[in-house]
Image (cartoon, helix red, strand yellow):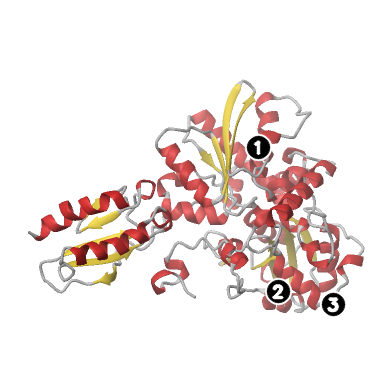
């Protein structure tokens, strides 16, 4: 099994989410493991190994050790990691709180400057790379705040090393994530300190389960252990980052108090919760109506972006997650079959319960966040914060110059046809168009005069399916239109 047309993964539409490995019926597709690297690090006495645990992981790891789906097992995970040999263990919910503060302040700037809208969240690396490949015109709309994983990676390499007086070369930063795309994200050149990644090793929930089992640890009977200080504290707002709608709700909790200058008594924004593919809400924040949308699943996103581009919908804030249910359905999580929907709902409920049980439920109330700003960054969106907590994104347009020939013309006077088979066009039926074009060439007896092939982007994703006939790009090609297009744009060139 390999990507389309024998290409490498970095040349095609893969967004590294790992959902293929979750759904593979034969288990032939597996996640590339970093388990050996993790063991090598914790067993090296000269290394200081720091782990961060993502919010969604806490409600899933226990499933593999006889605990109920959705049961929060954070303390047991921390205890297991300490037994294995990790020197410090922190909660990614802390850096999710930092992301909330930075992103909300960035959103306020958009409001003051009149846009550009919508403001898209950027915590999901699969969504970010999809936007870079398909929607480069929206990159200015993406939040520049780094994801919680990468913010914590930067904090570890640039702040923890300083306050703990640990040489940078001794520190190994390990993240335990629900998502395989986090492995790709950690390798982005934007996220480095001293020429090395801010996050050295990314392990999925599945990998940490294997690590605990290989260490012969009786997970179920472990006494819970606390996170390390001073950066081990995350609020309920950070915890719900692990479920679809959680980022939006965390930002709304911050924005409400920031814009109204009044304490928020009821912190729950149930209107953005749920498992519908698209949820919309209008929230009054200090007299300003904020229109938000929450979407999970890139196929659902495509429809939404199309309508936004066509000005059929308007939003101030749009949260995007690739995986079903958000991070709780990530490609690196324990398999949830056969009752996937039931398990995802239990995991979501577990995160919401953890939020309700939290003493602090708003990012702005987190003393660990205040500590980092007081001791290092100054204030949100400061020059230091921009340097260490934000990033920029760039266009990653897919193969455009390469023409993958399926039918090659022998005649010198020929017509070249390229059909886009990128995800957007493929889902709209472009593969069928490829087959029909070959049949039409045969029907009209011009197969020796028509070259037919595939490309991965003609840069009109929202208008697809798209085909290129010589230098002319035709959009919105349907089965019904194809014969007329062939007669008027192909045969006409051959007469």
Which of the two discs, 2 and 3, labels the residue nearer the N terminus? 2
Where 490 sits versus 211, above or below?
Answer: above
Instruction: Write the residue at 73% across / 45% down.
Output: 369
Please name which of the two marks, 1 or 3, marks the residue nearer to the observer: 1
Which secondary structure lies at badge 2?
Answer: helix
Q: Could you give the CA–CA distance between mark 1 and mark 2, rounded to whole angstroms?
A: 37 Å
Q: Could you give the CA–CA distance between mark 2 and mark 3, rounded to whole angstroms?
A: 16 Å
Pick whichever, 243 or 91, lies toward us.
243
Which quadrant is home to the C terminus?
Answer: bottom left
Q: Could you give the CA–CA distance between mark 1 and mark 3, rounded to whole angstroms?
A: 41 Å
Q: Which residue is mark 2?
A: 38
Please name which of the two marks, 1 or 2, marks the residue nearer to the observer: 1
In x, y percent, where is residue 179?
A: 63, 60
- How packed is label 3: few (under 14 Cα within 10 Å), some, or many (20 or more)? few
Q: Which residue is mark 3?
A: 216
Where 291 sits versus 423, above or below?
Answer: above
Q: Which residue is mark 1?
A: 272
Which of the two discs, 1 and 3, labels the residue nearer the N terminus? 3
Please name which of the two marks, 2 or 3, marks the residue nearer to the observer: 3
Instruction: Write the residue at 40% across / 59% down.
Output: 422
Horizontal side of 192 relative to 212 (left or right) equals left
Pick whichever, 287 or 454, lies toward us.
454
């Amino acid at each position: 099994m390999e990507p389309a047309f024998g290409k490498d993964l970095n040349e095609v539409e893969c967004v590294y989410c790992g959902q293929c490995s979750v759904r593979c019926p034969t288990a032939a597709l597996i996640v590339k493991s970093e388990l050996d690297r993790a063991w090598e690090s914790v067993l090296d006495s000269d290394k200081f190994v720091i782990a961060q645990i993502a919010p969604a992981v806490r409600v899933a790891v226990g499933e593999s050790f006889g605990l109920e789906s959705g049961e929060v097992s954070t303390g047991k995970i921390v205890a297991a990691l300490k037994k294995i040999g990790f020197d410090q263990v922190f909660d990614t919910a802390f850096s999710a709180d930092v992301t909330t503060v930075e992103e909300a302040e960035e959103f306020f700037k958009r409001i003051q400057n009149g846009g550009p809208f919508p403001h898209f969240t950027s915590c999901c690396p699969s969504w970010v790379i999809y936007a870079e490949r398909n929607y480069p015109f929206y990159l200015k709309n993406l939040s520049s705040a780094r994801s919680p994983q990468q913010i914590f990676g930067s904090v570890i390499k640039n702040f923890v090393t300083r306050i703990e007086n640990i040489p940078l070369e001794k520190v190994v930063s390990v993240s335990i994530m629900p998502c395989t795309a986090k492995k790709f994200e950690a390798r982005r050149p934007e996220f480095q300190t001293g020429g090395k990644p801010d996050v050295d090793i990314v392990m999925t929930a599945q990998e940490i389960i294997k690590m605990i089992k290989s260490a012969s640890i009786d997970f179920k009977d472990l006494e819970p252990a606390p996170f390390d200080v001073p950066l081990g504290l995350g609020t309920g707002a950070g915890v719900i980052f692990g479920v679809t709608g959680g980022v939006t709700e965390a930002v709304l909790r911050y924005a409400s108090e920031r814009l109204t200058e009044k304490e928020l008594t009821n912190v729950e924004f149930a209107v953005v919760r749920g498992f519908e593919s698209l949820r919309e809400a209008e929230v009054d924040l200090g007299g300003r109506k904020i229109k938000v949308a929450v979407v999970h699943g890139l196929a659902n996103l495509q429809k939404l972006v199309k309508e936004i581009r066509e000005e059929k919908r308007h939003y101030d804030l749009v949260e995007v997650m690739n995986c079903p249910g958000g991070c709780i359905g990530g490609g690196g999580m324990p398999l949830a079959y056969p009752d996937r929907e039931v398990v995802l709902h239990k995991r979501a409920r577990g995160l919401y319960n953890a939020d309700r049980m939290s003493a602090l439920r708003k990012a702005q109330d987190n003393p660990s966040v205040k500590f980092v700003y007081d001791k290092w960054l100054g204030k949100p969106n400061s020059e230091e914060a921009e340097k260490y907590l934000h990033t920029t994104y760039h266009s990653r347009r897919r193969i455009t110059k390469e023409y993958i020939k399926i039918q090659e013309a022998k005649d010198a006077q020929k017509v070249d046809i390229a059909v886009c088979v990128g995800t957007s066009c493929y889902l709209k039926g472009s593969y069928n168009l490829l087959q029909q074009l070959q049949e039409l060439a045969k029907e009209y007896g011009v197969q020796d005069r028509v070259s037919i092939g595939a490309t991965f982007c003609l840069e009109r994703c929202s208008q697809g399916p798209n085909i290129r006939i010589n230098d002319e790009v035709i959009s919105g090609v349907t089965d019904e239109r194809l014969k007329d297009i062939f007669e008027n744009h192909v045969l006409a060139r051959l007469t």
